[in-house]
Image (cartoon, rainbow, N blue to C red):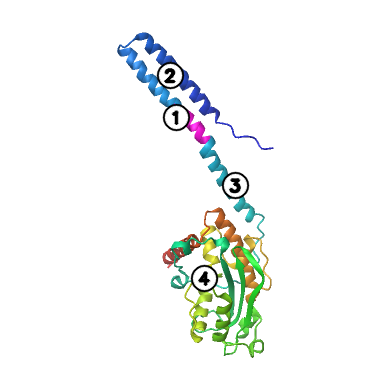
Amino acid sequence: MKTRDRPPLAGIVAAAVGGLVAFALLYWAASRGPDGAGMLGIGIAALAGIGTALALTNVLLGRTVVGPMRAALAAREMEIARLTANTPPPIPRAPRPEFFDPELARLTPAGGAEGKRKLAALTFVVFDLETTGLDTKNDRIVSIGAVRTRGPECLDGQCFATLVDPGRPIPKANTAIHGIDDAAVAGAPDAGAAAKLFAGFARESVLVAHNAAFDLAFLKRAGGEAGIEFDHPPFDTLLIARHLFPDLADHSLDGLAALLRIEIGRRHSALDDAHATARVFARLLEVCALRGIDDYDELVEASNMALELRRAAKSIAR
């Protein structure tokens, strides 16, 4: 059963005592007349009156301003705790190493009405790539998977998936990770054609990826082969998570999925990882809303803050 908020007892007592003192001093001063003692009594009574007013103000603010603000903050923290409660231990895996490129990861504020667009109303395309290796300058894409969402909601059936012929043999060590071999990509579009197909699917949507600079480096190379520019860096769930949960030990996709109780389908399948990233992104948007981050430029600012902190940490570690 909920009980109504009550004014602090100490505040009520202080106000009452102050009022009685002020009244007594005024009565005494009036009986003495306009001599020095009487004027001194009036001065002290005025101070006691001010103290009474301050005590009453404190009581009223506690009820009308401070109390509700504390309650709202407590409610937000309880909701964040609910979102991350009962966290299972992370599943031991070998996540892709973090790829750090500040120039690729830094986002540009849209400004004006574009920057004020509410995140809940935006259409996002959350994507993932599988590649022949981790060298963003020399390795090639072998698979692209993506899902379209509106705000935190995945749109049913709006998915994109294609294998990609890298134009070279796929190392067996990488096939062991994502299951894609040379036979699987035979007859698949090359990187430029696949990038063009993906660009068509993602048109007029905001891109999202995990460790986005890695995927963007590959996309930009593939797009260059087809004359397509991917010049708007995606929102990065890794950076957003670093901003929201700076003390979390593991910001990998597996770590965030464990924290937020999200099941990943077949790990290192581009489409399944895109689905998992989309669900992670949806939960991060819920936490962002609780933290007062609810429009495009506010999320850009949060992401860039996390990027700069990461860059500073890496500089110190050198």
Q: Looking at the image, which residue is at 45% across and 25% down?
A: 52
Examine the rendering and report whether any part of residue 61 can be seen.
yes
- Give, as a three-letter code, the residue at label 3: Ala
Q: How far apart are marks 3 and 2 (CA)?
A: 41 Å
Seen in the picture, residue 187 relative to 199 is either above or below; the reply is below
* Circle 3 residues within 10 Å: few <14, some 14–19, many ≥20: few
Q: Which residue is drawn at 63% across and 85% down?
A: 172
Nearer to us in this view, 268 or 150: 150
Crowding at dot 2, Cα within 10 Å, few <14 / some 14-19 / many 20+, comes out as many
Disc 4 marks which amino acid?
Answer: Pro
The disc, 3 or 1, on the residue closer to the chain's N-terminal end is 1
What residue is drawn where x is 55% and y is 28%? 9
The picture places residue 55, in percent across and down from the top left corner, at 47, 28
Which residues make up the magenta segment? 53-62
- Label drawn at residue 54: 1
What residue type is disc 2 on?
Ala
Residue, disc 3: 75
Tags 1 and 4 in contact by the CB under 8 Å rule?
no
- Image quadrant where residue 88 sits: bottom right
Whether residue 268 is visible to the viewer of this picture, yes or no, is no
